[in-house]
Image (spheres, rainbow, N blue to C red):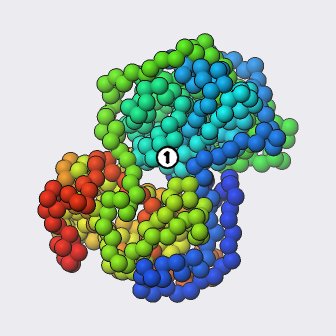
Amino acid sequence: MLKIFYEDLYSNGMRSYQLIITILLLFFTMTDLSAQNIRELDKIAASQGAASQLLFSVDLDKEELIHPSDFERDDECIVRGGIPNFLTKITNGQDVTVAFIGGSLTQANYCYRMQISTYLQARYPSTKFKWVNAGVSGTGTDLGAFRIQEQVLTQHPDLVIIDFAVNGAYAAGMEGMIRQIIQHDHHTDICLIYAILGGQTKLYRNGKIPLHIEALEALADHYRIPTVHLGMEISHLEFQDKLLWKGDAQAAGERILFSTDGIHPLKAGGNLYAAAIARGIDKMKGLSRPASHPLPKPLVSSEWDIAGMYRPDDIADFDVKWGAISTKESKLKAFNGWFDTVMVAGEEGAQCSFAFEGDIFGLFDIGGPEVGQLEVWVDGHRVNLHKLQSDSFQPYEIITRDNGNTPLNRFNAYCNNRYRGQYDLIKLPQGKHEISFRISSLKADKRLILGPSQQEDIVQHPAKYDSSVIYLGRILLRGKPILKTTRKQEIGDMRPQIYHQG
């Protein structure tokens, strides 16, 4: 499943299914960037991969209406407890909120989200729908568990549709999202949907399901949540030679062309995904009596129940080298749906610190050509980090504490002449911890990080990459922050040691 995760990242790094905002290439060499000249960053060149706005609308006059086929397979939708509260409300014409959370297939408009939203809005014209798009490209259920409170539950959804099947489908993170939803409101309905990758059509054709989806099905059984397998009709059409999973229009001929990359459906492929969801909703109509969803004991783990993300200026201290910029008025406006402001610094040694009680912390930030590296300090010690390798959850762990110097690099191959949301997590022993980030004096070899086909922009505009800027959108905690006012009495004053060691 690690391969699936990175295929998703790669595909989104190379393609955009939404508007790509192009700005005039203006650049300059930046030195000693301070809070006073942070706004000059808007002069730096880069094209931006568009991040979705959190709320979206449906225009029935502009959108094509899907027509679910008569495809029928008993296990396409497993009803279990259904979505009775949502169905009761829309049948009675009550206002409802529908939230989608997932990766790139959720974030993009026409992989299924816009089609099924249009279908529901047209079918229930007396209902006022509020639509939430909490898709973040190339991310899985671990970040989803951190995001769901702020991006979904604050909108008080009546139905949450979750799709992480091609992004690792880490079961513990998925359980964390499910449990957070139920804890927030026992009447919020949940539906898991499973998109697929090429090759998995053969499994469905043989009456099987992918192994990682089996783990999610176990969770769905445990919490009595309905699930919809989006790939079954597609598998059937492919077997009949009526659909080409991956290719181009010429190769497809008279067949439906599902995708050009083997992951992200074109609009015609998204119509098929949405049709499966529509058939599932129709099947669930038999369970339309309102019900309260119970919260049983965890099946995998309850550790992710307390995952959350926090505005940096709410829980952290920043030195004078940092400043806040509004994403709405800057080159980062594509990310305004996630972060209304970001904390920004670009000067070597710029520091921020916070404290928390728990076992995982991290950052949800924005990568780009000019981003740099961070030294990480834990409980007064600069640390070395090592990334754990697993199928779908890959936090860093600390391998040494004293005199460590493994910077956390915020630049990667997906930052080539574009901006992209990204995150990293660091695992610690359970307890109270003081954390500090410091912009490192060490600069990564960005040309080496970029592949052979990505050299043109960095060669032509080297000044754009020769910086160490950090765009911090949210701090991630599996645990609870220790507020600034109580930090010293809770864990002692470690900050002077952190600020002046090394």
Check the image and report above or below for 482 versus 166. Answer: below
Give the x, y percent position of residue 447: 52, 75
Total numbered labels placed on residues in the image = 1
Give the x, y percent position of residue 272: 71, 33
Q: Quadrant of residue 280?
A: top right
Q: Is residue 52 visible?
A: yes
Write the residue at 63% across / 82% down: 26
Check the image and report above or below for 369 versus 113. Answer: below
110 vs 2, left or right, is right
Residue at numbered disc 1: 151
Write the residue at 38% across / 31% down: 183
Q: Quadrant of residue 482?
A: bottom left
Q: Is residue 198 visible?
A: no
18 vs 423, left or right, is right
Q: Residues within 10 Å of mark 1 (few under 14, many from 20)?
A: many
Quadrant that contains the C terminus? bottom left
Give the camera-side residue of 373 and 348: 348
Write the residue at 39% across / 71% down: 373
Mark 1 belongs to which amino acid? Gln
> What secondary structure is marked by label 1?
helix
Check the image and report above or below for 48 versus 293. Answer: below
Give the camera-side residue of 391 and 104: 104
Give the x, y percent position of residue 274: 68, 33
Write the residue at 36% across / 59% down: 314
40 vs 350, left or right, is right
Give the x, y percent position of residue 23: 68, 73
Give the camera-side residue of 72 and 472: 472
